[in-house]
Amino acid sequence: MKKLLTNKIFKNNLITYGIVIIAFVVISIIKGTGNLSSLFTGLLVPLCAYIILAVSLNLVVGISGELSLGHAGFMCVGAFSSALFSKCVVGTMPDGLRFLLALIIGSVLAGIIGVLIGIPVLRLKGDYLAIVTLAFGEIIKNIINVIYIGRDSKGFHFSMTSEMDLNLEAGGETLINGAQGITGTPKDSSFLIGFILVMITLFIVLNLINSRDGRAIMAIRDNRIAAESIGINITKYKLLAFTVSSVLAGAAGVLYSHNLNNLQATSKNFGYNMSIMFLVFVVLGGIGNIRGSIIAAVLLTLLPELLRGLNAYRMLIYAIVLIAIMLFNWAPGALAFREKYSIKNWLSKKTGKEEM
Amino acid sequence: MALLEAKNLSISFGGLRAVDEFNISIEKGQLYGLIGPNGAGKTTVFNLLTGVYKPTEGIVTLNGIDITAKKTIDLNKAGIARTFQNIRLFKDLSVLDNVKAALHNHYVYSTFDGIFRTPKFRKCEKAMNERAMELLKVFDLDEKADILASNLPYGKQRKLEIARALATEPKILLLDEPAAGMNPNETLELMETIRFIRDKFDMTILLIEHDMKLVSGICEELTVLNFGRILTKGKTSEVLNNPEVIKAYLGDE
Ligand SMILES: Nc1ncnc2c1ncn2[C@@H]1O[C@H](COP(=O)(O)OP(=O)(O)OP(=O)(O)O)[C@@H](O)[C@H]1O
Ligand SMILES: [Mg+2]
């Protein structure tokens, strides 16, 4: 009996990995034969970043049961810190090592900020996290827009007013130029790296969920008082989920920024509407359903592009698809239907191995 | 020395003195009953003993050590486990995982072990599965290990709560109306199970119950609460024949 359960989880996870691997191989082949439009090719790396963001946000929203509206903010921290690092050290080390270090810096910094936000907020009972993370995301974006960092022979210069204020000597280089952001980040990201990071994210999140820590996190989500009564440290495990999620969001930011020659913090890429979009991925994919998050992130990123030809009807169809997925995933009737006609049930009935 | 002892335990909610100068002394291995009409303050006593509420006055000791006003999690580690009157299971976890969650502090491996599936992880999980199944078997729940806790029938949910509490390896088990919502057959079965737990695990049990058949069937001693105060206490048969107790219950009807 218990074997069956662990096997079921194992199989389920394998399917998730399998889907991602197959999708990667298929797209790589199409791309290799030159049949992928440049528009789609350009979307591949951001898509991987969005998948990582959706999966990591699901860890907070679905598994830990807390609402976070600042995922774009953590992504932003990872993106800018790593891009700044890469720009500073470009030419001094091999590209692979540089990207690896950038990845570590971006994720760790996002993780540290996650801890700093989480420690005070996750102690409180109630939905304070949503408000604080929402504010955090906006604050980060706005701060980055007024940061100027330059470098010349005398070292680093820092200002929060203007590029002129950096007083760079001739030959000095502006690293972060306020609202114009960072220009000339080495283009270290690729679809392959995106794929690898998605797989690592899945590995971390799925294994975490199916472990002692994951059980504690979900126990707290399901019933805080009962979890306390069996000796589980509430703050510790809420913080663990939130921090891991922040680290992964930071990694997604690193992937994202090393794909862009010109990185700016605008509301279009790091604003709260992006955080909400990641939340939409999670909700539509099914709260707590990791595979669903991936599928929703892919569909909802590609759909607007696929519908581009339809111009005026584009947003209308997008909205209809959103509602359709929502109904499919959450309406009680649809749930019952799926329960009744799922392949799994059909199979178990056939072989007469119904679990009960 | 008593295993669990409370002296002059009191708490007020606004003007209401929900528990007033509560005293209890439970010996190791005892099956002790806490009874009283609705709203008498029984659940509040449990909440005081498990750190959900902090008492305004009084002290609690476990094995002679002062544990007053400790946090719930520390009280569980010290050896107090409980079930809830309004069932509080982890409803989206499997029956097995509900018990495994409660093994949290007894089978420990790190987050790193968990993510990288180290040999320690495998060994620990295997031991947890075995231990959890053993506990589920006591409650006839081993066949249901794989289903979601929320899909269990009501009576079995109550049993799962007891299994979960036992998994934390407590010194004393507090059961809040374990038979509520059970039919007479299930209640009889539950009585057997409670007795079995006491004997097999050498457990000390304090239980709240309205079902007098269960109370008179298994409790050795009783304390009766009425309006937050102790009405009487003593041997079960004596207490249940006490006219004041009968009056308190009838007056409540
Ligand atoms: N958190 C609280 N705030 C205010 N009043 C409370 C609180 N908890 C309990 N009370 C009050 O304390 C009194 C005792 O409640 P308690 O739940 O302990 O009763 P009980 O003996 O368990 O009753 P029952 O048999 O119905 O479960 C009630 O009047 C209740 O309304
Ligand atoms: Mg009660």
Image (cartoon, rainbow, N blue to C red):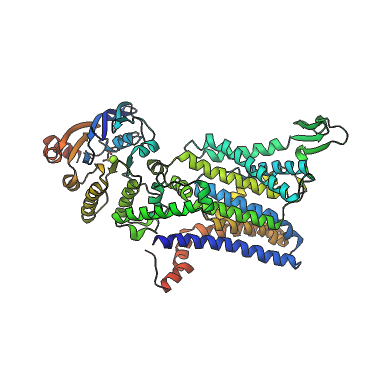
* Residue A259 visible in rendering: no
Seen in the image, is A129 located left or right of residue A89? Answer: left
- Residue A53 on image: x %, y %: 61, 50
Q: Residue furthest right?
A: A170
- Residue A159 on image: x %, y %: 76, 31
What residue do we see at 74% from left, 59% from top?
A39
Q: Residue furthest front?
A: B119
Seen in the image, is A165 located left or right of residue B100? Answer: right
Q: Nearer the viewer, residue B5 or B234?
A: B5
Ligand 2 in which quarter: top left
Location of the N terminus of chain B by quadrant is top left
Q: Nearer the viewer, residue A287 or A88?
A: A88
- Residue A286 on image: x %, y %: 53, 55
Q: Quadrant of residue B52?
A: top left
Q: Quadrant of residue A76?
A: top right
- Residue B233 on image: x %, y %: 17, 34
